[in-house]
Amino acid sequence: MAPRNSTIQILDPRAEDVPEEVGLNANLPDLKGKVVGLLENRKYHADAFLQELKEVLVQDYGAQKVVYATKFSYSAPCAGETLDSLAEECDVVIHGVAD
């Protein structure tokens, strides 16, 4: 029987791209005294993640208040009333996605 030549391919699990670092927006240099909106998309663990983030925003970044809102479904657009309310009440909004 003739010997078989075989090849082993080794894959590199690191990301191919280096993420671009961007600085803070000049219009919002920090969160001290700001109202931060958190919009949950109802995916698995999004609520737990955003509840932890809420504590970090207040305790570590000095946010005055965190407003929490939830989409009806992760696959549907957010209700216009919810977006309008967040835009009116908040200085900045974070849309949390988790799985």
Image: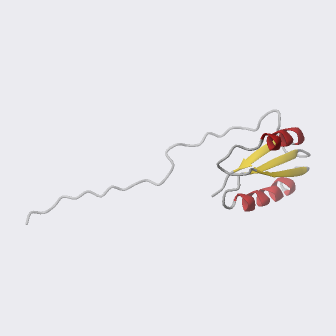
Name the residue at 81% across, 56% down.
Answer: 54
| Relative to 60, residue 35 above or below | above
Q: Position of residue 27 (x, y in %)?
A: 82, 33
Name the residue at 80% across, 33% down.
Answer: 26
Residue 20, can we see it? yes
Quarter of the figure with residue 80: top right
For the N terminus, the image quarter is bottom left
Most distant residue in the left direction: 1
Closer-to-camera residue (72/65): 72
Quarter of the figure with residue 8: bottom left
Quarter of the figure with residue 11: bottom left
Q: Position of residue 31 (x, y in %)?
A: 85, 45
For the C terminus, the image quarter is bottom right
Position of residue 17 in the picture relative to residue 23 (left or right): left
| Relative to 76, residue 22 above or below | above
Most distant residue in the top direction: 26
Name the residue at 74% across, 59% down.
Answer: 47
Q: Position of residue 40 (x, y in %)?
A: 74, 52
Q: Position of residue 52 (x, y in %)?
A: 77, 60
Closer-to-camera residue (3/79): 79
Residue 91, can we see it? no
